[in-house]
Image (cartoon, grey):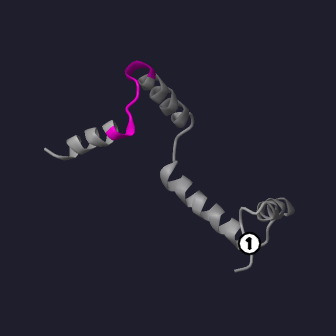
Amino acid sequence: MNLSLTAEVQKLIDDRVKSGKYATREDVVAAAILTLDQQEHLGDFGIGELDALLVEGERNIEQEGTLDGDEAYRKRAELRCP
C-alpha cells in the first residue's frame, strides 16, 4: 500500500522513529491505527462526557474513599458468586 502524507505528518512519523520508541515508520503507522481503533471503540464519549465522568469519580473518591486492590478483587468476586 502506498500513501501520500503531508510533510507535517511525515515529520511526526520520522520524529517518533528518531526518538527510538519505534524501529520503523511502519511501526509508527501501525501504532497510530491501533490507537485510533481503540479510541473509536473504547473512547467514544460525547462532548464533555469524559470530563463529567472524571468529576463524578473524583467526587465519589472524596465521599467514599478508595479500596486497596485486594479488597476490590474480593468485592468483585463476591458480586460474581451468588
Residue wearing tag 1 = 24
What x and y, as percent, mark residue 1?
Answer: 69, 80
- Image: 45 above or below 3: above
Residue at 38% in and 39% down = 69
What is the quadrant of residue 20 in the picture? bottom right
Which kind of residue does numbered mark 1 sit on?
Answer: Thr
Highlighted magenta segment, given as a residue range: 62-70
What is the quadrant of residue 82 in the picture? top left
Residue 26 placement, left or right of 38: right
Q: Nearer the viewer, residue 59 or 72?
A: 72
Residue at 24% in and 45% down = 77
Residue at 70% in and 72% down = 26
What x and y, as percent, mark residue 2?
Answer: 74, 79
- Name the outermost residue toward the left: 82
Residue 41 placement, left or right of 34: left
Identify the element where label 1 is drawn.
Answer: loop
- Name the outermost residue toward the right: 7
